Structure formats: C-alpha cells, structure tokens
Amino acid sequence: MATASANDLHLVPLGAGDLIDRAVRLYRRHLFTLMRIAAPPVLVTAIGGVCWTIGWRRVVSTPDTAALVFYVLLICVASGLIIGGHIFSLLVMGGASRNLVTHLLWNEPVLARTTYAAVRSRFWSLLGATILVVMWLGLSMMVAYFASSVLAVFLIFILGFLATWGPLWLTIVVGVIGATAATAIFLWLFFFMAGKVAYVPQVLLVEGKRVFESVSRSFSLAKGNVRRLMAMTFFITFATYSALMILVVPLGFYGWLVYGILPWNTPQWPTWYAIAYSVIEPLSSVLLAPVWMLGMSLLYVDERVRHEGYDIELMASQRLGAMPQLNVASPFAPAISAAPNRLPLRPGPTGSVLGLR
C-alpha cells in the first residue's frame, strides 16, 4: 500500500490545490531532466544579461570613441540575446507540452531530446503561436489596466469628497476597499483574457492543429480556468522570488562582509558583483520554469476531462487500442495526434492516467 502504483490513481477534475500538488510531485520525480530541458534558453538569457551588464556599465564611462561603439553594439547584441532567450524559453515550454502530456497519459519517459525534437518538428508554427500569444497577453494587460484605472479615477474623486466632508476612518476604509476592488478587477480581467490562449502550445503539438486553429481551440477549451490559472501563477511567482532570495541574500551578505558593497548603491558595484547579480534571475527561473510546464500540461488535460470526457477516450484507447482513422467529422479532438511530430506514441502496458508513484 505504501508503494502504490501510479496507475492506481484516476483521471479526475483538478482543483487549484490538486493542480499545484501534482505539478510539484511530478517536478520532484523528473527534476534533473526538466532542468536540462529548461537550461539552454536560460543560458542564452544569462549570456545576454552578462553582456548587457558589461556594456551598460562601460558605455557611460569610456572616453574612447571606438570603445563606445563597441559597447553600444554589445548592448544591442545583449538585447537580442535576452529577447531571443525568452522567446526560446516559450518555444521550449511549448515543445515540452507534448512530451509531458504523453507522459501523464501513457507513462512515456520525459526526455530532453524528445522535447527538442518536438520543437524542431514544428518550430515555425510554435514561433508564430508564441508571437500571437505574447500580443494577446499585451492586449490583456492593457484592457485590465484600463478597467482598473477607470475604477481608480472614481475612487480618487470619492476619497477627495470623503476627506473634505467625512471622518478620517471612513476615508481609510473606503480607500482600502476601493484599492482591493481595483486590484481584483485587474487580476480577474487579465487572467480571464490570458487564460483564453493558455493552451495554444498544447493544442498545437498534442492535437496537431495549425496556429490559428490552435488559438480558436484554446478559446473553446478555456472555460472557468481563471482561479486555477491565477493560483498557478501566484505559486510560481512566489516560489521564483523565494529561490531568488536564497541566491541573492548570500551574495549580498558576502559582498557587504568582505568588500563593503551596499546592495542599494548599484553605481558603485564592482563588475564581478554586477555580473553575478545579473545571472541570479535566470538561475532561479531554470529551477521553477519546469513547474509551469507541468502545471499548464496538467491544466490542459484537466480542461479536456471536464469538457470532452477525455478520461473515457483514454480508457478506451488503453483497453481497446488505437482508434481507427475514419473520415468522420467530430467536434472533439483526438487524444494524441501522431502525425505532426512523428514521435513514437505507444500506450503503457498498465495504462497510467495522470498517476504518480
């Protein structure tokens, strides 16, 4: 009983807590493989951060024209590396979705080469989908900011009136309630809109659809996922900053104790300290990015369970074999599309469905 098989657990709708719990447990089981998957894009971003730090610190103090041109070019190269590294990270997250979903459903091994094979097989589609998703996220941010700003303007007028004619305690209470409401509206609107494109990479690689079809399919799947997506985002944000503090505090203490470096006096930082500080954020992201990959893959499978009876289809495929290819139109997508990536797909002999050891 203590070593119950992963296959004893059933595929059921997941709440926010279950989603985070299973993502963390899977993360612990595949820690080093997931870190290898996330490391290459983070390395590109870290190199860009180092180049940016060196160029920015030297460009304002160099007296030589040739050196000035060199450091300006270095800053431009660093900007390209940082932007490219973040785009590369999004592509890898999308490519990992197929490997993770097949692992969740059929116990396929989680391998770095499988993930990067998926990225290579649909690189341009992933790139186009990433650009569309980033544009949509920017639009979501603007809409949420506008709505919360409108509420903030009304709140300022109300607080001004209360400050003139009302008691102080009432002004404070209304201000706190209004600020909380504006923040809640901003977060809900942003995650409501952002959640519409949350499953684009999964649909692209798991179901084998084209870019715009994947966007449309993600819109149709994303129903009632605001709270779970928000919980996952907050958890990863807090975990990332916790990991960041674990790395930043020892560095700051060592710099202050040995060299008298003050953390808030950035212009006086030595170059080695500034470079070390610039690579800490990528190091923390390589530890936590896999949790986001796992969480989004779990959330995608959960949406299909809730809306399409995905668990029934998977149970049938495990017991009866693969569904024959029939020329029949269906409103639902197949469990796993084998054509787009030409990756080996075989159900495990015991049929694990989101099970964990």
Image (cartoon, rainbow, N blue to C red):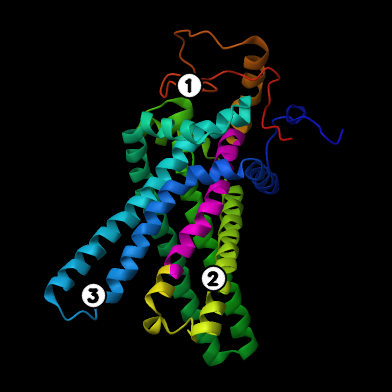
The residue labelled by disc 2 is 248
| 120 or 102: nearer the viewer | 120
Residue 188 left/right relative to 153: right
The residue labelled by disc 3 is 59
Q: Is residue 287 magenta?
A: yes
Q: Residue furthest left?
A: 65
Rendering quarter of residue 348? top right
The residue labelled by disc 1 is 337
Among numbered discs 1 and 2, the one appearing first in the sequence = 2
Identify residue type, mark 1.
Answer: Ser
Specify start and end residues of the magenta stretch as a single range. Answer: 276-302
Residue 153 x, y percent position in the rendering: 44, 74
Residue 290 sits above or below residue 166 on the image: above
Residue 100 x, y percent position in the rendering: 56, 34
Q: Secondary structure at mark 3?
A: helix
Among numbered discs 2 and 3, the one appearing first in the sequence = 3
User: At 26% across and 75% down in the image, what residue appears?
Assistant: 58
* Residue 18 at least partly seen: yes
Prevalent SS, magenta region: helix
User: At 47% across and 22% down in the image, what residue appears?
Assistant: 343
Q: CA distance from mark 2 to mark 3?
A: 26 Å
- Do the CB atoms of the residues marked 1 and 2 lie less than 8 Å apart? no
Residue 351 left/right relative to 138: right
Residue 263 x, y percent position in the rendering: 48, 81
Among numbered discs 3 and 1, the one appearing first in the sequence = 3
Residue 145 x, y percent position in the rendering: 42, 63
Residue 162 sits above or below residue 132 on the image: below
